[in-house]
Image: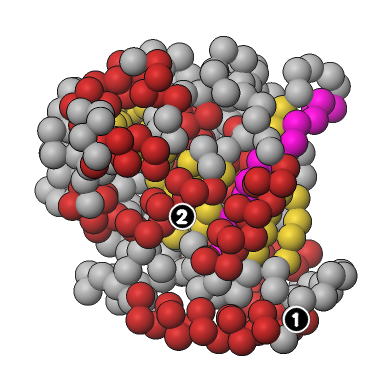
Amino acid sequence: MSEILELSARAAGERIREGELAAQECFAAWVGAAANDDLNAYLWRAGEDGERATHPPLAVKDIFCTAGVPTTAGSRILEGYEPPYTSTAVRSLGEAGVGVLGKTNMDEFAMGSSNENSGYGPVLNPWDLERVPGGSSGGSAAAVAGGLAPWAIGTDTGGSIRQPASLCGIVGMKPTYGAVSRYGMIAFASSLDQCGPLTRDVTDAALLLSLLQGRDPCDSTSVGIDVRSSFEATLHTLEELGGEVGEAPLPSAEHGISAYYVIAPAEASANLARYDGVRFGLRAGDGDLTELYERTRAAGFGAEVKRRIMLGTYALSSGYYEAYYGKAQRVRTRIADDFRSAFERFDFVVTPTSPSVAFKLGEKLDDPLSMYLNDYFTVPMSLAGIPAISIPVGVAEPDGGGPELPVGFQIAGPAFSENAILDAAFALEQAVGFDARPPGVPA
Ligand code: GLN
């Protein structure tokens, strides 16, 4: 059993396809591992199945609609909601022989950097149970790092795959905007949201991405492989011009947090208008319609989501639209221009993924701004729509002492440079040889 759990997802899949490992045995081993969830990583877990699987099963952030399975986006407002359809990402993986192991906990509607905004309680970091796993895909990251899942998918709007991957010592990648379909992925900020892999190593990330990406007629912003390869050909031309190591000026990137925390709440305020007690999940109040809306939204949304709705509604209100939303959009354009110029000189832009290692549960809950600042390095790429990966490169002692915790390294590249980023990350991964694991998790 434990031998199965030690295999990388790719290695396990190979054994299944070569008939050396029974798909059901692999599935059952992971169901057993997931049942030991002492991190509050899962909101729902599958029973044993996996007969037709050709890969090990996958932990799915609870933001992906899955027919007949509860889907909450970490919010009480969707408690009891079972979608009538399955998201394209989960459906494509199912067709490729990757079953669903469970649905993972997350910050409510993907708003957060610590998982403490979940309506179903925080997720714990397997490296130190007193610390956050990062967010908003903290359940997926903790499940993979804690040996509760072989691999997982999450979503990243401003860092929500990369930052929890960094804080949990695993690999997390946000693909190019449009590389993976958003159909059936509950919307937070539609022009920023992207699905991507959270895995133990770069090879598994490459494999999972290859199963996820592609054009989907249900998502007009998704892009086909053909378009990708012409982009990649352009990238190769860029590489042939020769790389230069140095500082890439990104003068507008420092305004990324300000722009992101206007644009994302603005889009969220529109996307979340649909949770009104009529069509989904929770319904509170039996008086008139306005009262139904008010009571349902007051009872169903958590504090951070309410804060975002207020910020977003304010930023979009007619008197302030230009001053906030209009300005933020101009900053976004400048950040994209910064990257465009940087990529004329460099193949990649590298940064730390997160300004600190995992912080303690509760440490930043009362201070939204300090929570938001955690996204300093990840938000600019989201605003520019470009891909970036976080891979673990070392461990460091947290401020104030305690056991050593993982440090992530972010590599960003031009749109559709996923293959080049994965190649570079793989080379780095091999050179660094990161083999630390949380206490009790075998290497
Ligand atoms: N931490 C950022 C936020 O709170 C990013 C979230 C995400 O990528 N979904 O909005």
Q: Which residues are magenta?
A: 385-399
Residue 163, horizontal then vertical, whole percent: 61, 45
| Pick the front one: 391 or 434 | 434
15 relative to 161 in the view: left or right: left
- Tell me the mark number nearer the camera, choosing from 2 and 1: 1
If you read the primary sequence from the N terminus, does the residue marked by circle 2 or circle 1 appear first? Answer: 2
Q: Residue at x 65, y 30 (%)?
A: 435
Residue 401 can be seen, yes or no: yes
Name the disc covering residue 63, or none. Answer: none
Q: Is residue 410 above or below residue 138?
A: below
Residue 61, horizontal then vertical, whole percent: 38, 41
In reply to whether residue 395 is colored magenta, the answer given is: yes
Name the disc covering residue 242, or none. Answer: 1
In the image, is the residue at mark 2 within 8 Å of ligand 1 by its beta carbon?
no
Helix, strand or loop at mark 2: helix
342 relative to 120 in the view: left or right: right
